[in-house]
Amino acid sequence: MSTSIATHLPTEKQELRDERTGAAIWQLTDAPCVNHAPYFLNPAWAGANHDMLIITSYRAGAPNLYGIQLPDGALRQLTSSGDVSPWSACVSPDGKHVYYAATTQLRAIDTITLQETVLTNLPPSSWLGNCSISPDGSEILLAAQKDGKNIILAVRTDGGGERVLFGTDQLVAHAQWSPDGRTVLFSSDLPRMWLVEADGSNPRPLRDQTFDEWITHESWLSNDEIIFTYWPHALKAIRRDGTGERAVAEFNCWHPAPRRDGAQIVCDTTLPDVGLQLIDPTSGERETLCHPQASSQGFQWSQPEPYVGETAPDEAYGPQWSHPHPSFTPDGRGVVYTSDISGHAQVYLAFVK
């Protein structure tokens, strides 16, 4: 257990307005380096009032976590190790702790005292993926590799140990708790979307998939429905029992993220970029929130069909910080996104009218 040295930085907040939609926007970072929020499905708001946005910034030369206190925008450095897995951070339901992966460790940091705890430390040949916290805050899920096997690892947040929830020789990624904590959604090799129960039982594909279908960016809309991108044709939904597949809206939805109550979805777009879209998941009606004008790099996303080689190179998908990756604020009144329109990836907050 250790304590980080807090570095307080002045606000970098600038107030802007989208020229086409009129949306009010706050630019929250302005450092000449890569800055971005955590993975767009991760809870990223800390503090008792959930008013401190956790971000990753390279302003000290390597990835560290910072908190942006709103509404004033003052920054506080939370880590100094420089080994943070850039997209892994997620915040506890009570806002008191941030969990993140760093090399082979899962760490927890107290957002008030900055006391840091290592919750698990895997062997040197291992790796840890993105974090997903259970609805009750008791366990963190991570896709991981240990002893040559791909696993879903569940780690107790109280330091009480860990368990291998699921293991396979196939790909495991993007493990996500269901809102009710009963089931885990994860991605794998074709078919992409899989489910497994929280006790590790009944692993099964959610949906069959042909080689002609490009499915990506799945997430829970509610306890009963999962949304996913049917690239680049539609935003789709399917029930957790594999029935009732439907097209929510037919357009080039890219990274969809639901509001906490499931009553609205936000997504970015590319091929072509028509801005951030706010979607009604019942009617499919949508409107443009704003235009991030991010560079949205990665040749996978400049064509309607996926790369079909054995292993796609990194440049096929990113860099990830060049994608907007929008997500709602806890109250649903704003959307956080990333854009490198200024020449560096910066974090923005657009307000929903």
Image: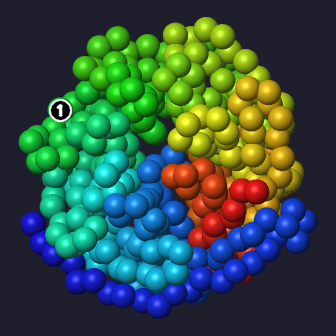
Query: What is the quadrant of residue 350 in the picture?
Result: bottom right
Q: Residue at x 26, y 27 (%)?
A: 165
Determine whether, in the image, residue 47 is placed left or right of residue 266.
left
Pick out the residue farthest to the bottom: 10
Please determine whether, in this image, residue 5 is positioned above or below residue 326: below
Identified at 59% across, 43% down, the residue is: 259
**Front residue (pair 259, 81):** 259
Q: Quadrant of residue 152?
A: top left
In this image, 64 relative to 314: left or right?
left
Query: Mark 1: which amino acid?
Result: Arg
Give the residue displayed 58% in from the left and 77% down from the top. Answer: 28
Colour convention of the picture: rainbow
- Is 6 left or right of 38, judged from the image as shown? left
Q: Is residue 319 above or below residue 78?
A: above
How many numbered marks have been drawn onto this rendered protein structure?
1
In the rendered image, residue 332, in percent from the top left (x then y), is placed at 60, 50
Up/down of 194 relative to 145, above or below: above
Residue under pointer 1: 163
* Callout 1 crowding tier (Cα within 10 Å): few <14, some 14–19, many ≥20: some
**At x 46% / y 74%, what residue is drawn?**
68
Classify the position of the N terminus by image quarter: bottom left
Q: Nearer the viewer, residue 228 or 308?
A: 228
- Specify the quadrant that holds the C terminus: bottom right
Where residue 149 sits: x, y (%)? 28, 33
The x, y position of residue 311, in whole percent, is 55, 42
Q: Secondary structure at mark 1?
A: strand
- Residue 201 appearing in the image: yes
What x and y, as percent, mark residue 286?
82, 41
